[in-house]
Image (cartoon, rainbow, N blue to C red):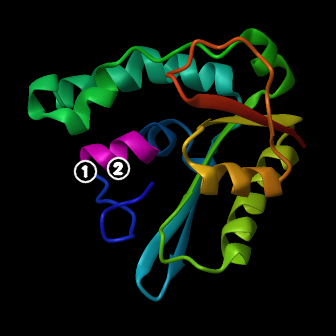
């Protein structure tokens, strides 16, 4: 999830934009960073009102980032040029907040990652959220296990996601 050296990628890089750009631009108050002696090594990002966040991302943030990183720059930026899939309304009604978590491979202390995630979940709950959701690749067993330990479950909804991805949710 993070940069090649196990750290957060530079903010101006396409990878940083893919991971955190929309959260840093549209929901910075719910973006937390984990640091160790090697520097930034993890993050927890969220949006209190996912529906509005996703609409703003699609209508303003994505067009700007697509202009900044045209598709001819290479494979790393093609993510920005794919049309994002709409999250089903039943998910947004039951789980109105969006979260995204990531840590560098060098982070061996699961407690630090858990504390970071719980910090985000607590902030969202304190501001009125009653549930959160995220998208995770079926192939990412480590992420699936981590989210499961935080109380997330696979959501049984029809969703036209990319093959091998699923929506997870958790009530707060």
Q: Residue furthest bottom?
A: 37
Viewer-nearest of discs 1 and 2 = 2
Instruction: Work out how far the residue at label 1 is from the one at label 2, CA to CA, in angstroms.
Output: 7 Å
| Residue of label 2 | 16
Residue 31 visible in image: no
Q: Say whether residue 117 is magenta.
A: no
Asked if marks 1 and 2 touch (Cβ < 8 Å), the reply is yes
Closest to the observer, 52 or 72: 72
| Residue of label 1 | 12
What residue sits 29% from the left and 20% below the top? 81
Q: Say whether residue 16 is magenta.
A: yes
Q: Is residue 106 shown above or below 169?
A: below
In the picture, the disc for residue 112 is none
Residue bounds of the magenta highlight: 12-20
Q: Main secondary structure of the magenta part?
A: helix
Residue 152 visible in image: yes
Name the quadrant containing residue 161. top right
- Mark 2: few, some, or many residues within 10 Å (few <14, many ≥20)? some
Closest to the observer, 73 or 125: 73
């Amino acid at each position: 999830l993070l940069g090649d050296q196990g750290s957060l990628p530079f903010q101006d890089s396409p990878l940083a934009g893919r991971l955190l750009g929309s959260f840093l631009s549209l929901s910075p108050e719910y973006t937390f960073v984990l640091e160790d002696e090697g520097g930034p090594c993890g993050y927890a990002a969220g949006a209190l009102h996912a529906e509005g966040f996703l609409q703003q991302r699609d209508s303003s943030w994505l067009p700007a980032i697509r202009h900044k990183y045209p598709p001819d720059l290479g494979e790393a930026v093609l993510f920005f040029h794919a049309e994002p899939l709409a999250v089903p309304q039943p998910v947004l009604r039951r789980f109105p907040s969006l979260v995204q978590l990531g840590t560098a491979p060098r982070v061996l202390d699961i407690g630090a990652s858990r504390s970071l995630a719980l910090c985000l979940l607590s902030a969202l709950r304190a501001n009125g959220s009653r549930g959160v959701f995220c998208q995770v690749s079926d192939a990412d067993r480590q992420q699936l296990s981590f989210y499961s330990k935080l109380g997330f479950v696979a959501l049984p909804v029809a969703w036209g996601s990319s093959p091998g991805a699923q929506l997870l949710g958790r009530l707060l």
